[in-house]
Structures are given as structure tokens and as C-alpha cells.
Image: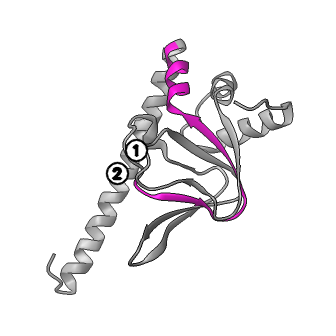
């Protein structure tokens, strides 16, 4: 972990408050996460991680933006989303070290906050009540994302059926 001055610590706490995973936490609880966070800088087009790499943690955008991409020889780079301040990505790596499902690149110069699985697990061993609170919020958000994805899939399926394309 890099040493952090008090202004930077305050800025990290401010950004953590923006993230739905942490929005219901007390200042003391946020400080526990701030203490295990890692602050990184990325230049435009610099990869945060590549699709297929093992996941090691999640990232929160402090400043700048990150492009979530699929890269293939046939299509080149296809941007799936652009994420900005307070948004997070890579969160599944906190519970599963499986391969990343997309590539994330700095869309412009970016500062990000990383929270890595080993550090999170050590924190949660020391503070199990905080772990319960975190993972309850985590699973609630994952459930909401799953529901939104199912609705989008149903909408797309209906559009395909109306166009008489066989799936």
C-alpha cells in the first residue's frame, strides 16, 4: 500500500461514499476499507486488466474514466461501457478468482482505488460484523444487476422474435 496524506485519505473516503457498496457504512467502517485500499494512476489507453486474467480485486474510479471493452481480432476494440467517478468494476473478483470477463482500459488519464481480495479477507477475519454488512450489500447489488440483465435479455429476445430471426 502507498502512504497516503490526509487530503488523499479524505478524498478516498468521499469517493467510497459514492459507491453503493459502501454508501450505508459509518465513517469508522469506511476508514477500515480506506486503510486496505490501493491508489493507482493510469494513462489514457493503459490497461487496468485484460480479459482472461485472474481476478484479484475490484476498482473504484476516483477521477477520469475507464472503458470496459471486448477485444477480438475480428472486431478490434468494442467499448461496452464508459465508467466515471464513483463507479466500480471488477467486483466479482472479491468472491471469485476466475478469469476477467472483459478488458478495462483507462479511457482518459484516471486515478483508481483498488481493493484486493487478500486484503479484504484479512479485514473481514478481524471484523466479521463488517464482513456481514459488506457482503449483504454486495449480494443485494449483484441481485439487482442480475434482474436488470434478465430484463434486458428478455427485451432483446422479444425484439429478435419480432424480426423473425431464429435463435
Circles 2 and 1, Cβ within 8 Å, touching? The answer is yes
Vertical side of 82 occupied by 34: above or below: above
Q: Position of 93 compared to 111: left or right?
A: left
Question: Between residues 59 and 153, which one lies in front from this camera angle?
Answer: 59
Q: Is residue 159 left or right of residue 140?
A: left
Residue annotated with mark 1: 142
Tell me how far mark 2 sits from mark 1, CA to CA: 6 Å
The boundaries of the magenta stretch are 101-125
- Secondary structure beneath label 2: helix
Mark 1: secondary structure: helix
Q: Position of residue 141 (x, y in %)?
A: 44, 43
Dot 1: within a 10 Å radius of its alpha carbon, few (fewer than 14), some, or many (20 or more) residues? some
Determine the image quadrant of residue 64.
bottom right
User: In the rendered view, would you say 15 is above or below 24?
Assistant: below
Q: In the rendered image, which quarter contains the C terminus?
A: bottom left
Question: Left or right: where does residue 93 sit relative to residue 6?
Answer: left
9 within the magenta span: no
Q: Position of residue 9 (x, y in %)?
A: 78, 33
Seen from the viewer's position, the closer of residues 11 and 79 is 79
Is residue 111 toward the left or the right of residue 139 in the image?
Answer: right
Residue 109 inside the magenta-drawn segment: yes
Label at residue 146: 2
Amino acid at each position: 500500500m502507498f502512504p497516503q496524506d490526509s487530503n488523499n485519505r479524505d478524498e478516498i473516503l468521499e469517493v467510497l461514499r459514492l459507491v453503493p457498496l459502501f454508501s450505508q457504512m459509518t465513517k469508522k467502517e469506511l476508514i477500515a476499507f480506506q486503510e486496505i485500499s490501493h491508489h493507482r494512476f493510469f494513462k489514457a489507453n493503459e490497461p487496468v486488466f485484460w480479459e482472461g486474467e485472474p481476478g484479484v480485486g475490484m476498482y473504484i474510479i476516483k477521477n477520469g474514466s475507464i472503458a470496459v471493452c471486448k477485444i477480438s481480432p475480428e472486431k478490434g476494440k468494442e467499448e461496452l461501457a464508459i465508467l466515471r467517478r464513483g463507479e466500480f468494476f471488477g467486483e466479482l473478483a472479491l468472491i471469485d478468482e476466475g478469469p476477467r470477463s472483459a478488458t478495462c482500459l483507462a479511457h482518459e488519464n484516471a486515478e483508481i482505488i483498488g481493493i484486493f481480495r487478500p486484503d479484504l479477507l484479512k479485514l473481514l477475519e478481524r471484523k466479521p460484523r463488517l464482513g456481514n454488512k459488506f457482503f449483504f450489500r454486495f449480494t443485494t447489488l449483484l441481485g439487482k444487476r442480475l434482474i436488470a440483465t434478465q430484463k434486458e435479455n428478455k427485451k432483446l429476445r422479444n425484439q429478435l422474435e419480432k424480426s423473425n430471426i431464429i435463435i
